[in-house]
Amino acid sequence: MSDQQFDVFFRGDIVAGQAVVEVKERLAGLFKLEAAQVEQLFSGRPNAIRRNLDEASAKKYEQALLKIGAVAELRPAKEEASPSPQATGEGGLSLAPAGSDVLRPDERASVAAAEVDVSALALEPGGGEILRDDEKRSVEAKAVDTSHLEVLPPR
């Protein structure tokens, strides 16, 4: 036997030939659970039933569940050490923790700030004219004869 710790998971799988209703009843009796808690265990998602057990104890739980018709899964317990900053997968790709920089420091390009001459720009107060007087074109007013037009009353 090893010193490795195991977690016992259950997601709702049952032994072939067993009735789901009966397995749920036996599981409720074994762990003294309410009906709602049993339903959560049969959600299809892995739920930890027991954590950090030695191998012999984990196998006893697995056998006890198998005896009532429930199929458990033993997984090595994860050590609660400080998480590594990156987990490397196949091909050397890694997934950085949320909120971290995408590029490593050696991959970042150094960009110098650009010098932009803004001395010719002016900021006018709001609500005023957009054009200065020297930028406006003068337009001659033309006289238009409208004496031949009439406005009819609405119908």
Image: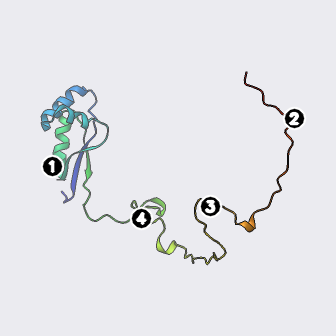
Task: Identify the residue position indicated by label 2 in the image.
Answer: 148
Q: Residues within 10 Å of mark 4 (few under 14, many from 20)?
A: few
Given the image, on which type of amino acid does mark 4 rest? Ser
Task: Identify the residue position indicated by label 1 in the image.
Answer: 57
- Disc 2, SS: loop
Q: Residues within 10 Å of mark 2 (few under 14, many from 20)?
A: few
Q: Earlier in the sequence, mark 1 or mark 3?
A: 1
From mark 2 to mark 4, how far is it between C-alphas? Answer: 77 Å
From mark 4 to mark 3, how far is it between C-alphas? Answer: 46 Å
From mark 1 to mark 2, how far is it between C-alphas? Answer: 108 Å
The mark closer to the camera, 3 or 2, is: 2
Task: Identify the residue position indicated by label 4 in the image.
Answer: 100
Q: Quadrant of residue 70?
A: top left
Q: Residue at x 81, y 57 (%)?
A: 139
Task: Identify the residue position indicated by label 3 in the image.
Answer: 128
- Which one is in front, 45 or 19? 45
